[in-house]
Image: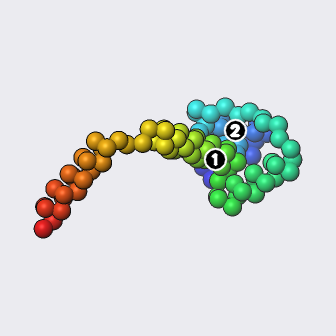
Amino acid sequence: MPGISSNDTGRTQDGIPIGIPPQYGDIMSVTTIKVDTALRDRISAAAREHGQTIGEYLDQIVKDARRRERLQAMANAMHANPPGPDYWAEVAEIDSLSAAVRD
């Protein structure tokens, strides 16, 4: 595999830490997160099932969680500020215009 060496530095020939996808090599530093070993094993298994590294898998989980939070905030705002009668009158007008165009 290009860029991979079996030297004892723990890095590829390109200087990227082994196990880090090459696309992240120049922009990503590596750190350790302390979690229970059972949780680590569950995360690792889930990442493998999705064909991802642990880092890629965790990144996707965080992105998905943030998206759910944004959507929930929007839903809460819409619930707190429902459309008024003017809105529904405008919707009815647009619907009638659309129906006329289709006919």
The residue lying furthest to the front in this view is 85
x, y percentage for residue 5? 70, 45
Task: Identify the residue under disc 2.
Answer: 17
The residue at the point 69 percent across, 54 percent down is 47
Identity, as a three-letter code, of the amino acid under mark 2? Pro
Mark seen at residue 61: 1
Give the colour scheme shown.
rainbow
The reply to whether residue 63 is visible in this rendering is no
Q: Is residue 4 left or right of residue 9?
A: left
Q: Is residue 45 above or below residue 58?
A: below
Mark seen at residue 97: none
The residue lying furthest to the bottom in this view is 103
x, y percentage for residue 54? 70, 48
The reply to whether residue 7 is visible in this rendering is yes
x, y percentage for residue 61? 64, 47
Q: Residues within 10 Å of mark 1 (few under 14, many from 20)?
A: few
Identity, as a three-letter code, of the amino acid under mark 1? Ile
- Quarter residue 82 falls in: top left
Label 1 and label 2: CA atoms lie apart by 23 Å
- Quarter residue 24 falls in: top right
The residue at the point 81 percent across, 52 percent down is 41
- The mark that comes first in sequence, 1 or 2, is 2
The C terminus is located in which quarter?
bottom left
In the depicted view, which residue is nearer to us: 77 or 89?
Answer: 89
x, y percentage for residue 92? 24, 53
Q: Residues within 10 Å of mark 2 (few under 14, many from 20)?
A: some
The residue at the point 25 percent across, 47 percent down is 89
The number of numbered badges drawn on the structure is 2
Q: Secondary structure at mark 2?
A: loop
Mark nearest the camera among 1 and 2 is 1
